Every structure is written in C-alpha cells, then in structure tokens.
Amino acid sequence: MWLTKVLIVLLCYTSCSYGHRNKFDVNVPVTNSQSVLQPQINSASKISKTCEVHIRKYEAGILKNETWALQMFDSSANFPSSGILNGNIIYLGDFDTCINIKQEAEISGKYCLGSLPLSMNDREDKSKLRNLQTPEARMVAPDGAVSGMFAVCLPDSCSAEDFQEYYKNKIMKLNFFENLCTSKSTNPELDAGDITTISIISVILYIMLMSTGYEALTSYIKIKPAHPFLTAFSLITNTKKLLQTTSNSGQISCLHGIRVISMMWIILGHRYTISSMMPIVNSASMLEWFLNKENMIVMGATVSVDTFFLLGGLLVSYGFLVATSKGFKFNIFIYYFHRFLRLTPLLAILVLIHATVLKHLGSGPLWNYFITGLSRSCETYWWSSLLYIQNYVNPEEMCMAQTWYLSADTQLFLLSPLILLPLKRWPKVGLALTGFLAVCSIITSFTVGWIEELYGFMAANKNMEDYMKHYYFQPHTRAAPWLMGIILGYIIFDIKQKGSKISINTFINILLWLVSLAILLACVFTAQNTLEGTYVYDKFANAVYIALMRPGWALAVSWIIFACITGHGDPINWFLSLPVFQVLSKLTYSMYLIHYTMLFIMSAQTRSSTYFNNLQMMYVFWGDFAFTLGGAVIFTLAFESPILMIEKVIFGKKEKSPPLRDQVTVPEECQKKIEIP
C-alpha cells in the first residue's frame, strides 16, 4: 500500500518537472524547467543574498543552456527510478560532477543530500521501511517518519538552510543538514595535527628505510650489526620473523587457525553491517534476508569475539603458569608494562590517524557523515582509548568502536593476578574462585538482560545503544568466556606439565564432538525467531539466552581446543595448525584494529546504490579481507614488530641479571600475540 502511494507522489512530481528530460540536449530550450525552478525565490524568501544571486544566475544559465548550469542541474538526482517497489528510495545523483563545477571564478557546485519524507498510514509498513533506512536518512527525517534520500546540486554559496528554503514550496519537501553537504571549499585544510601525524609517520618510515639499508649493508659485507637496536625497524628482519613458522611442544598450534577464522568472521559480519547502512536498491527485500535462517551465520558473528575472550584467558593463564614453573618470578609492574607495550604503540598511531588525517583520505556523498564522525570521536576521546576505559567512560561515542574489546580484555587482564596467583599456589582454590567468578558473570548478564529488557540476540534489539552500553561492551557481563579460558589454560598446562595422555573412548569422543557442534549451532541459530514480526517478547527466555549463549559458545570451543591438543581431533587439529594460519595469526591484532575503519573508508566513498545479496557481499568481503591483510602487513612491520624487537633487546640484554631475568612473565613461545582481540 505504502509503495503505491510513494509511486503516485513521485510520478506527480515528475509530471510537474518534466522539463528535466531535455537537459541532455544543449540545443533544446529547457523552458519547461521554469515550473520547477522559478517559484522558489520570491520577495518573502529567506535565502541569503549571495546564494540568491547565484541561484538566479544558475536558473538563467539553465534557460540559456549553459554547460555549467546544465551540469549542476544534471548532478541532482533523477527520480522516480526503477526499483521503488523494492525499496530503492535513495538517489545519489552525480557527486563528482557537482563538486567539480566551476563557473568562471564566481560559482562552484555544492552537493547536498536531503531527506525525502514519505507519508503513509500503514503503521506496519512504515515501521518495516524505517528499520531498513540508512542511519543518515533517519537522522534528517522528522521523528518517526520514513525518509528516502535525494541529492541536490546548487551553488556553493548556499548553506543547508538556503537549500531548505529554496525547496520549501516543492510538492515534496526536502530537509537538509550541513554535515550531509560537500563542496571543494568545505574540504578541510591540513592543520597542525595533520602535519604532526604526517611528520611522525614519515620519520618512522625513514627509520625503517635506514634500518633496512643498514642490515642489507652489514649482510653484504658479512659483518655483525653493531647493536640489535639498529635493525629493530629493518624490513628484512621483521619480514623474516613474520613469515617464520615454528613447531615445538610449548605451542598450542590449533589456536592459530581458530584465531584467523574468527578474525575473518568478524570482518564478514562488519561488512554486512556497514553495507546495510549504505544506499541499497533492494532495501525492501532485506526483510526477507533477515528472516532467512541461513543468514544467521552472518548475524551471529558476534560470538567470534567470545572466542577471542576465551583465547585471551587461556593464554594469560597458560603463559603465566609455564613461566613461573621455569623459575621466573612474578613482577606485577613488568606484567602490566609488557601488556601495555605490546598493545599501545600500534593503537596510539591509529588513534592519531583517526583524529587527524583520516578525514583527508577520501570523499563521497556519505563521507562527511560517516568518516567525520569517526574522526571527531577520536579527537575528543583519544585519552580514554589509550587508557582502555572508554567502554565505561564514553560507550556511546567510542574512538575506534572496535577497540571496546581491548578495553574490556585489558580490564580483565588487570584483575588477572588476583586469580593467577592463587591458581599457582593453591590450584583447587584458584579453580574454584575462577568458576565462582564465571557464575557471577553469568548471573550478572541475566540480571542486566532482565532489568533492561534486552533481546538475547543482538540484531533483534530495537534500542541497540542500550544493548551495547549495558551489556555488550562491559567486562562484568562478558567475563565468563575469559574466565573459562583461564581454567582451560590451567588444564592444558597441567596435561603438558605431567605429560599425561588423555584417553577417551571413541564413542564418547564422537558424542562430545557432536554435542559441541550442536551447542555452536544453537548459539548462532536458535534466536532467529526473535527477528520475526510475530514474535512476542519473553523477558525470562531472553535473559536466559543472554546469560548462557556466550559461555555456551566458549564451552564448545574449549572442547575443540582440548580435543586438538590431546589427539582426539587430529583432522581438525591438522587444519587449524597449518603454517599459513601461523603466519596470518601474527597479523590478526593489526587486522582487528584497522579492518573496521578500512571497511568504512571503502564504503563511505560509494557514488551509487548497490544491490544487496549474499553473493555480492561475499565478493566484497574477499576484497575487504585482502585490503585489510595488506594494511595489517604494513602496520605490523612499521609499528608492531619493531616494538617487539626493542622489548626483546631491553629485557634480553640483561639476562644474567637476576632481578631482570626473573621478571620475565611469559616464555618466548607463549609471547606470540597473546593479546589478540
């Protein structure tokens, strides 16, 4: 019903402005355009003086078939377009032509996206369509209204308010906001922050070049480098270490494959999320996509983060127990400093890039809306990001939103000595304490879900901000998988320490694998009914799901890891332990930090609406993965590997000094990316 009404309105509008059909032929007078263009400026107009003068020149230019004016007119969106019945209600026009228009030295083009409010009486249809709108369309629409987007090109001297005034008497009122407008004059200039960032990056690249050249020279003339510091930034050394694969009894090699696959799943989930924010020609059919059970594998990708929580807890406890069993004394300062040094340099340079030069890296109809927001949050909250507290301080406006995980995981890490020290000295007490805390976290999750009336499945929540702020970002509600990792790390250490051989009956082994698989599938697929329009909210059931889903996922993944290291999952262990995963695993920290922004950079530059389906998304995903992988190699070699080398030199130079040697917290075989998101 509502789409029929939209068609009637759009066709009516088109009949009133049919003159635009002739704009492609400069030899045909565009006299019919007067019905569209002339009535907007009158004696009561509130348009600014300069804008009014330029608009009159623009209108006159159209009547004279002047090229620049026709380009400006042609850059505005044309509608109706095909696919309206399928939800194609966003018209982006011609962005590049508009902003490149220049009429002598006086008039330039300004591209603005305006909302196109659509009136309808059917509440169900209205609600469905509004849920499918892009965020920027909802922003400029009146509260509760359904709105499409319509691109307009006018002289650069006009503000968003002038655009609004100019179109106020049209059949369909357009609403404009300045942050959805772009012109060459509004492009930000390089400021002191930008120059500082460029200078820092340039210095680091110069050091890399000099370090690489020095190592190449010493290798050529066959002499030993004067000091390890001189080759810490060398591409030769760091690339060799990146590509190096090792195999020893201290490694839990299956973790490499689990880590890489989880990272790919995160990128896939974010690709679908970001693409759903962009203009889509078949947005109405997205409802069918959401209700298709097979697509839960994408919407359920959030549990991949719980895999990382599990791995984080596992490697913290396993590394600690291995180190202390070798006689290394625990020093809490070095323990925390090691963590900070591993995570912060790369994070800091990325926060700096976000706060400064990021806004200069592209353009497009939606660039200002998406990318400026990313930059502004880092300009304001860079400090809470580097202190790993923004999930509590500013959960609604995070700098690099994906780093919520770093904050939560670091907060758990800071508390880990309270568990690890009892676990080492009194294992039974430590295990009981860890289990008790895991149960407390589960109960807390249930309580939060009950009080806030949250849906267990993320995509079903109507108010996503409340879900994120009260549940998703908080370590006290996400701690159970991490604590389960602590217990698993102890079990693995105990098995390896004693050289125990775990024997499991074949039938029991198969049964445990089937139960594990069933739990994994249940965690992803069972909440699909909460997305259906007929679903009646069940407060208790959703609170139970929110409390048990993530620990259940962690439990199933724990079995996979346990089976792999005890020889009860050899084919799976062989696959997860492939050398390629060991190499890619070293890049996952950089991939996690950069992937979200890279996806936005690529998507925010879109010039036209896209078609949404799984094949198209998979095609885009592999491009995302390739670009993210390439970027991760660059950032790892430039900002992560050198720090690891320097740290090794600092703590390795004084190996004979008991005070420093005894402060080593994790043996080298356990230090490879233990702080992965």
Image (cartoon, grey):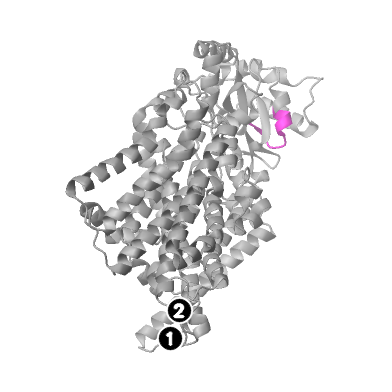
Q: Residues within 10 Å of mark 2 (few under 14, many from 20)?
A: many
Task: Left or right? Give the position of 666 relative to 61.
Answer: left
Question: Is 553 inside the magenta-drawn segment?
Answer: no
Question: Is 154 inside the magenta-drawn segment?
Answer: yes
Q: Which residues are magenta?
A: 153-163
Mark 1 falls on what kind of element? loop
Determine which quarter of the picture holds residue 219.
bottom left
Q: Residue beneath label 1, please? A: 225
Residue 152 — which label?
none
Label 2 is placed on what type of residue? Thr
Q: Nearer the viewer, residue 330 or 285?
A: 330
Residue 510 at x, y = what percent? Answer: 21, 45
Check contact, mark 2 vs mark 1: CB within 8 A: yes
Label 1 is placed on what type of residue? Pro
- Residue 48 lies, with reference to residue 254, above or below; the image says above
- Residue 662 lies, with reference to residue 63, above or below; the image says below
Task: Left or right? Give the position of 173 relative to 593.
Answer: right
Determine which quarter of the picture holds residue 179.
top right
Q: Nearer the viewer, residue 239 or 544?
A: 544
Q: Residue beneath label 2, please? A: 231
- Residue at 59% x, 67% y is 200
